[in-house]
Amino acid sequence: MASQAPLAIEATGLVKDFGETRAVDGVDLAVRSGSVYGVLGPNGAGKTTTIRILATLLRPDAGSARVLGYDIVEEADSVRSAVSLTGQLASVDEDLTGRENLILIGRLLGLKRAGAKARAAELLEAFGLAEAAARLVKNYSGGMRRRLDIAASIVVTPRLMFLDEPTAGLDPRSRNQVWDIIRSLVAGGTTILLCTQYLEEADQLADGLAVIDRGKVIAEGTPGQLKASVGTGALHVRLLDPDQRTEAERVLGRELGAVHLDPDPAALTAQCSDADRGAEAVAALARSGVGIADFSLGQPSLDEVFLALTGHAAEEGPPEQPEVIEEEQPA
Amino acid sequence: MTTTPTTEIRSSPGADEAAVRKAIASTARPPRASALSAAFTFGWRGMLKVKHVPEQLLDVTITPVMFVLMFTYLFGGAVAGSTAAYLDYILPGILVMSVLFTTVYSGVALNTDLTKGVVDRFRSLPIWRPAPLVGSLLGDTVRYLIAGTVIIVLGVILGYRPGAGVTGVVAALALVITFSFGLSWVFTTMGLLLRTPNAVMNAGFMGIFPLTFLSNVFVDPATLPGPLEAFVKVNPISILVNASRGLMEGTASAGDIGIVLATAAALTAVFAPLTTRLYRRG
């Protein structure tokens, strides 16, 4: 990396096994201070396990990492004092109210009772949760829960924040709100490690990206570089007659290269680096007698990035059973 | 006090960007919370849950009432000649039994907690490592206190008159709660080792049930066959019951009390660090 900014995260050869499954298989990461670094990959790729190792929740079986200059094993408590974690499951207590959640975290971080109350009130106001402050979190909508979750992570402003799929399952409006909050955090100088399955999210927020598959980093770069390596976009075609898909696949393969058959039996997707070639491919389809219901040229999806980088689709990744919250069973 | 609606809250304003930026900029990191303060904060969390879900107190109040009424009136005449005489014998025993049964729920509650994302946040905080566990057990002692108080009040209503008066009863209650605090670490260890809350419940009662019934809670061990009598006499629950009866009647032996406290200390010394280690490695 060209910049001289110090590294907020420096990981070398991280490995984590869960029984027979190797969830993380030699991950290296270098994240500059003050940046948003995206870790992109399908479910089960090892993203959450990597985050949990860096946040000191899991010990790596091999490899080492420094977070903000502290060793994650030897100086775990110093790491904990400087970072905060917003997990994949909302890391808030559903049986308490929003205000109680924030006071609880404030007290645990060492604020006095009055200080914790004042901070909770300030955050509830800032995150648009003041009216819901006295309601139990189990009655919050997904978007409110996420905002509370992030508010809980900045009760004391962290120098580095781990965000694990912060917008999974949110409607577009809530998702935009969460993105705005993340941008504000970055503007305030917090470094962010963001795990996501959505290329668009990484594109919107991240300065740098690592793509993870089966526990390994398979590509690294800016979102722009990554997309360029895949082709700037994809041509999506839906046919009038699913029986013609084989013929369409042949034509598109000849015109554009790699073709991906969508789950929809009448749809297929081809990598397409520029609009002119896309238009020609559609014309070629029409000439060959394939009936087209509709077509579009779009940004590459994570699926397409994966197809290009690995030759297999994202959802074909190995099932990684301990990815979410599964407890590590003592031997 | 605001009431809690059960409906989903649908519309809400978003975050205010300027206010968010101000909130981010406005705090310095306070000094680390002390071990005691962190533990009490978790105790407070336990109390809040009781406040929001008061139904969870039902099992610590209804069950003891059922035990007292059932055993006194069903077996009293047969075992001790009269219900009044049996009440004097059995009340301290039922006090012990009810509170000990409640300790199993500490493990069940911990296991349930682990399935929630909030535990990840607790684990990522710079706090005294055992604080979440010690704190929730401190909160649980309030439940033990409620269960114990229900039994004693009911006993007094039914005609139980402890010889050592209020002081003796308070001392017995304190002893039972101290022992339960130690015992509950066994169940929190189970809570971390077993996969589901139900498994913790089953395994817990499989242990505590026979131990409680093979004690002097219900019958005088002198009436039992030899080998069984020998076991009942060394069962720590029998010793706890003896000490509690003694404290309530004013005839307690320092030896019994010492054994109870030493057992509680030993259970804590073994299972508290074990629980803490299991909790942190997640």
Image (cartoon, coloured by chain):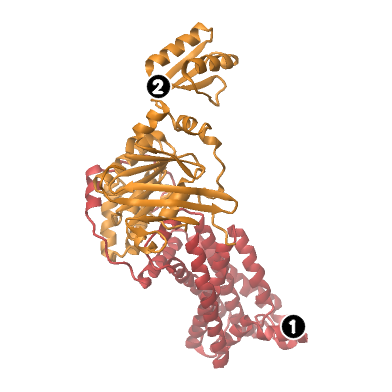
Chain colours: A orange, B red
Q: Is residue A47 above or below residue B39?
A: above
Viewer-proximal residue among A252 and B168: A252
Quick one: quadrant of the N terminus of chain B? bottom left
Q: Is residue B214 above or below residue A179?
A: below
Question: Residue furthest toward the right?
Answer: B225
The reply to whether residue B83 is visible in this rendering is yes
Q: What chain does badge 2 belong to?
A: A
Q: Residue at x 42, y 68 (%)?
A: B131
Q: Tell me the element at label 1.
A: helix
Dot 1 and dot 2 residues touching (CB under 8 Å): no
Question: Residue furthest toward the front?
Answer: A2
Label for residue A273?
2
Residue B7 drawn at (x, y percent): 43, 45
Q: Mark 1 — residue?
A: B228
Q: Residue at x 53, y 71 (%)?
A: B185
Residue A316 drawn at (x, y percent): 55, 36
- In terms of image quadrants, where is residue A280? top left
Disc 2 crowd, CA 10 A, few/some/many (<14, 14-19, 20+): many
Viewer-proximal residue among B192 and A31: A31
Residue A176 drawn at (x, y percent): 33, 37
Total numbered labels placed on residues in the image: 2
Disc 1 crowd, CA 10 A, few/some/many (<14, 14-19, 20+): some
Going by the numbered disc 2, the residue's amino acid type is Ser
Going by the numbered disc 1, the residue's amino acid type is Leu
> Are discs 1 and 2 located on one and the same chain?
no
Viewer-proximal residue among B91 and B278: B278
Residue B189 drawn at (x, y percent): 55, 67
Image depth: mark 1 or mark 2 in front: 2
The reply to whether residue A148 is visible in this rendering is no
Q: Residue at x 44, y 56 (%)?
A: B120
